């Protein structure tokens, strides 16, 4: 294939295609993503000769030598401690009290608690597992079909990477050189829009199929019920309060906010006597396993990104696509399609480190704000997590319930469609991503 750019002509040969084929083959064989990326990067470097292999080791370490990345294990650990201390159940109690007056109240409460959990852990898979264990059985008891209950949790858990603080925004900020705090602020409105779209979809589905009753409560009863829930669980909101106030006020960096949240959550666990020293080994091992999946991917993606840049792949991709059409409307749709498809088959981290450097030049070429591009990219990847039949969250909820993935996927379609509407709005309405930002970013 011959890609022409303004300054050069890029001809891709087997030094590009063979590593790509190798990467796809290894992923299909269920080889860990970091190993597949590393193998493809090394083969590409050997075949192209563009970068000495002696520099690969240095590249691996410089790829993860970033202060911002220390926030990732801290937010992961905070989410784990939150579950072990039982504070996550307090979120559910308050969410249920908020929505119990309406028909379909517990379904709405499930979506809200997904958003609350997202505001602390920053991980969709962790949210799907934690919230799923708490709510799916009760959703079924409330009248929801089991596959639909699973789909509801899978959709709600997508907010894990969409509502700040989010691990995904930390990583894309690192890859593209953008402040994570800026991205957190920009993602607030889009993240809430996704949450609202899931809530509205569940309400509509509940109206159509009468899954769950409710709504027989007076305003006084509702206020009393909510007051009781807040009285018994108000302290659980100290943790997200610290994170949000610290980051958005500028008093704390994401790393400092994550560290503070870990310490406060652990102290609360000791005070409530729901956490003991004996819990620490398993808790730390659990968090380390999750972090151990993310960091090697980032590390091995660094030499791959360097090789692709030297070969001119990002610039060539832009030239190739714009030679077909220069219509920004169509190019944005193309990017959304690529991102959703990628989100179906791979986790967020490899998608970000591989696709962000390739797609950002295309976004720049059509005049898209870089902040808007980041928000669109992460949101589209989030939609991919429940897009049938390979969405990651579908597998998570299937794993904890034993329900058929195909049945869950069929029930997830309405959520995919409404979330897709939000993605399109984010892509074409810059104000959704930049309204809360200083004028310099607008």
Image (cartoon, rainbow, N blue to C red):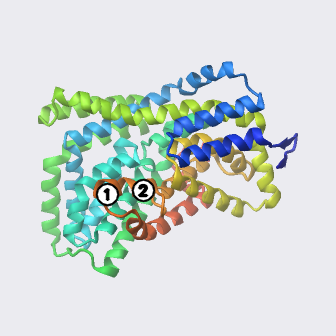
Q: Is residue 250 visible?
A: no
User: Which residue is at 72% across, 22% downward?
Assistant: 52
Q: Residues within 10 Å of mark 2 (few under 14, many from 20)?
A: some
* Quadrant of res 278: top left
**Mark 1 secondary-structure assignment:** helix
Q: Looking at the picture, tell me which residue is in the foreground, 55 or 74.
A: 55
User: Which numbered tag is attached to residue 112?
Assistant: 1
Q: Is residue 429 above or below residue 123?
A: below
Q: Residue at x 14, y 61 (%)?
A: 225
Pick the front one: 281 or 83: 281
Residue at 83 percent across and 57 percent down: it is 323
Measured Cα–Cα span from mark 2 to mark 1: 10 Å
Residue that numbered label 2 is attached to = 192
Instruction: Tell me residue 230's x, y (percent).
Output: 17, 51
Figure disc tally: 2
Residue 1 sits above or below residue 148 on the image: above
x and y percentages locating residue 78 in the rendered image:
31, 36
Q: Nearer the viewer, residue 426 or 410?
A: 410
The residue nearer to you, when weighing 68 against 304, is: 304
Q: Quadrant of residue 357?
A: top right
Position of 211 relative to 90 (above/below)? below
Helix, strand or loop for disc 2? helix
Residue 36 badge: none
């Amino acid at each position: 294939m011959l890609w022409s750019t303004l300054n050069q002509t890029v001809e891709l040969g087997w030094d590009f295609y063979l590593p790509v084929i190798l990467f796809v083959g290894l992923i299909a064989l269920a080889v860990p993503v970091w190993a597949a990326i590393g193998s493809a990067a090394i083969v590409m470097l050997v075949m192209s000769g563009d970068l000495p292999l002696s520099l690969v080791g240095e590249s691996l370490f410089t790829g993860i030598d970033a202060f911002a990345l220390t926030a990732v294990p801290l937010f992961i650990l905070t989410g784990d401690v939150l579950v072990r201390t039982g504070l996550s159940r307090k979120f559910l109690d308050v969410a249920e009290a908020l929505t119990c007056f309406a028909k379909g109240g517990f379904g709405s409460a499930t979506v809200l608690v997904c958003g609350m959990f997202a505001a602390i852990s920053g991980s969709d898979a962790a949210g799907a597992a934690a919230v799923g264990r708490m709510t799916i059985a009760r959703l079924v008891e409330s009248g929801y079909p089991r596959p639909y209950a699973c789909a509801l949790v899978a959709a709600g858990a997508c907010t894990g990477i969409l509502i700040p603080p989010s691990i995904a925004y930390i990583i894309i900020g690192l890859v593209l050189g953008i402040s994570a705090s800026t991205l957190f602020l920009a993602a607030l409105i889009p993240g809430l829009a996704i949450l609202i779209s899931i809530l509205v979809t569940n309400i509509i589905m509940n109206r159509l199929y009468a899954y769950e009753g409710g709504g027989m409560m007076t305003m006084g009863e509702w206020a009393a019920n909510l007051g009781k829930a807040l009285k018994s669980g108000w302290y659980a909101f100290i943790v997200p309060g610290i994170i949000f106030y610290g980051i958005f006020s500028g008093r704390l960096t994401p790393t400092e906010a994550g560290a503070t949240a870990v310490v406060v959550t652990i102290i609360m666990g000791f005070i409530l006597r729901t956490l003991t020293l004996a819990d620490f080994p398993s808790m730390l091992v659990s968090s380390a396993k999750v972090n151990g999946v993310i960091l090697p991917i980032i590390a091995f993606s660094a030499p791959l990104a360097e090789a692709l840049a030297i070969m001119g792949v990002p610039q060539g991709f832009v030239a190739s696509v714009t030679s077909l059409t220069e219509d920004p409307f169509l190019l944005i749709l193309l990017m959304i399609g690529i991102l959703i498809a990628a989100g179906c088959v791979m986790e967020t981290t490899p998608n970000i480190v591989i696709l962000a450097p390739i797609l950002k030049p295309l976004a720049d070429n059509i005049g898209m704000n870089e902040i808007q591009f980041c928000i669109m990219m992460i949101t589209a990847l989030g939609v991919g997590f429940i897009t049938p039949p390979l969405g990651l969250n579908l597998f998570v909820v299937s794993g904890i319930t034993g329900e058929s993935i195909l049945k869950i996927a069929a029930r997830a379609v309405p959520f995919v469609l409404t979330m897709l509407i939000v993605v399109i709005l984010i892509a074409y309405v810059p104000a959704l991503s930049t309204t809360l930002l200083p004028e310099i970013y607008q």
